[in-house]
Image (cartoon, rainbow, N blue to C red):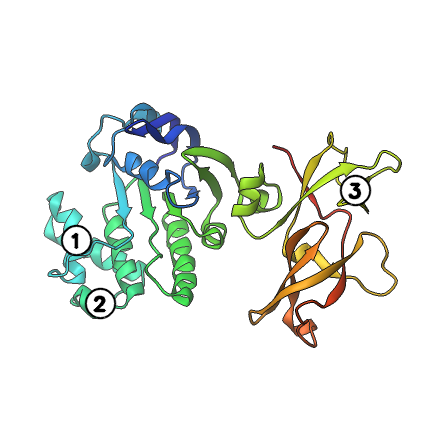
């Protein structure tokens, strides 16, 4: 296995930098995700790691060895593509064995290793089937087995779940996490799906416009985003412009309404506060602190939750309540009183 270091990595197409001086490190055995919108540079970064695209500047190291000039077949990387890239005319066994045969491994060793890896991905008994006889999830596991059977130092995965339906994506991301931890292999995973990234990753790198926005554990990025882009990309939130109320300690004003915070020293005004939809509650009788009036614009029932788009504090924000605790859906134009705990808002320090 190998630790990975990207040092001031640059890639340009024409005059546009799609990877713009990115530096980061990935620990040996870590599940590390590159997360961002389409066109942010994450797949280009993955292709540079695989050796399919040459960087225009910077260095890539596996362990203490630079691999920038190493051809793809000598980088000891396993790659799982978005479309799986299985050979339709080969059986599952032969698809998985392809890399071992290319390395001229002995036939008995190939048989043993393919059978072992198929067992690991819960595909024992499928060796003689063809890709067309498999479900999408099974094809994805064949692609994963083919990447792992060569015992690579690094596993690279490019949006491997994007072709699956919603339920199967959830099942397969849990399976990928289980397999990765079982093998202890350093993994770089590319996705644009925030929930998927948070579910599988040890750490996440957020990319936008070819630049690194933030690196951290999923919980840290979700609860302590470094900037407004990361705050909004990691999930629905309200971004509120606030000013300190100099007449009262721990008080701020948002849209001329006084509110109280427990967030440590107040930054210089004005500043931005972030509130996630599930941090806001319906105000009960007797609650006065951080209570504000909202007007419903839209109500969405999603099964476990009821999500309201409401106009409040000078903007439109979303709030999320447990459906089991809602006796009815509020109508458009209906008013309700909301509140949030003083410790809840997060200061966005640009």
The quarter holding residue 140 reads: bottom left
Q: Residues within 10 Å of mark 2 (few under 14, many from 20)?
A: some
Q: Residues within 10 Å of mark 3 (few under 14, many from 20)?
A: some
Q: Is residue 184 visible?
A: no
Image check: 19 left or right of 278? Answer: left
Residue 289, how many percent across, how many down? Answer: 84, 52
Alpha-carbon neighbours of circle 1 within 10 Å: few (<14), some, or many (≥20)? Answer: many
- Tag 3 secondary structure: strand
Residue corresponding to mark 1: 97
Sequence-wise first label, 1 or 3: 1
Query: Mark 3 = which residue?
Result: 253
**How far apart are the two marked residues, 1 and 3, measured between alpha carbons?**
65 Å
Quadrant in the picture for the N terminus: top left
Q: Residue furthest bottom?
A: 327
Q: Quadrant of residue 4?
A: top left
Spatial CA span between label 2 and label 1? 14 Å
Task: From the image, state whether disc 2 or disc 3 is nearer to you.
Answer: 3
Residue 249 is left or right of residue 37, and the answer is right
Residue occupying the point 70% across, 46% down:
345
Instruction: Give whichever of 247, 285 is nearer the camera.
Output: 247
Residue 126, numbered circle: 2
Tell me whether the residue at label 1 lies in contact with that at label 3, contact meaning CB atoms closer than 8 angstroms.
Answer: no
Nearest to viewer (mark 1 / mark 3): 3
Relative vertical location of residue 55 with respect to residue 248 in this rendering, above or below: above
Give the structural element (helix, strand or loop) at label 1: helix
């Amino acid at each position: 296995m190998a630790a990975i270091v990207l040092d001031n990595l640059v890639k340009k197409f024409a005059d546009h930098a799609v990877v713009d001086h990115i530096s980061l490190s990935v620990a040996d055995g870590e599940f590390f995700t590159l997360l961002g919108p389409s066109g942010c540079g994450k797949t280009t970064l993955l292709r540079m790691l695989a050796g399919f695209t040459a960087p225009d500047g910077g260095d890539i190291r596996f362990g203490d060895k630079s691999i920038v000039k190493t051809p793809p077949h000598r980088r000891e990387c396993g790659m799982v593509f978005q479309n799986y890239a299985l050979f339709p005319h080969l059986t599952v066994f032969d698809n998985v064995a392809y890399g071992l045969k290319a390395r001229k491994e002995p036939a008995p060793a190939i048989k043993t290793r393919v059978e072992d890896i198929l067992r690991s991905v819960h595909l024992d008994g499928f060796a003689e089937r063809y890709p067309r006889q498999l479900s999408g999830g099974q094809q994805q596991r064949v692609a994963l087995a083919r990447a792992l059977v060569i015992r690579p130092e690094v596993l690279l995965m490019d949006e491997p779940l994007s072709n699956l339906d919603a339920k199967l994506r959830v099942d397969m991301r849990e399976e990928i996490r289980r397999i990765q931890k079982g093998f202890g292999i350093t993994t770089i995973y590319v996705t644009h799906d925030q929930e998927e990234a948070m579910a599988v990753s040890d750490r996440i790198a957020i990319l936008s416009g070819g630049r690194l926005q933030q690196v951290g554990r999923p919980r840290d990025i979700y609860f302590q985003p470094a900037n407004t882009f990361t705050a909004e990309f990691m999930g629905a939130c309200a971004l509120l412009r606030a000013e300190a109320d100099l007449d009262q300690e721990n008080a701020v004003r948002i849209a001329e309404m006084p509110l109280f915070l427990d967030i440590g020293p107040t930054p210089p005004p004005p500043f931005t506060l972030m509130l996630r939809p599930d941090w806001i509650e319906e105000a009960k009788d007797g609650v006065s602190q951080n209570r504000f009036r909202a007007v419903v614009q839209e109500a969405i029932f999603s099964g476990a939750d009821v999500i309201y788009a409401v106009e409040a504090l000078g903007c439109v924000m979303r709030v999320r309540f447990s459906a089991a605790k809602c006796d009815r859906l509020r109508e458009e134009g209906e008013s309700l009183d909301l509140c949030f705990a003083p410790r809840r808002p997060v200061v966005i320090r640009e």
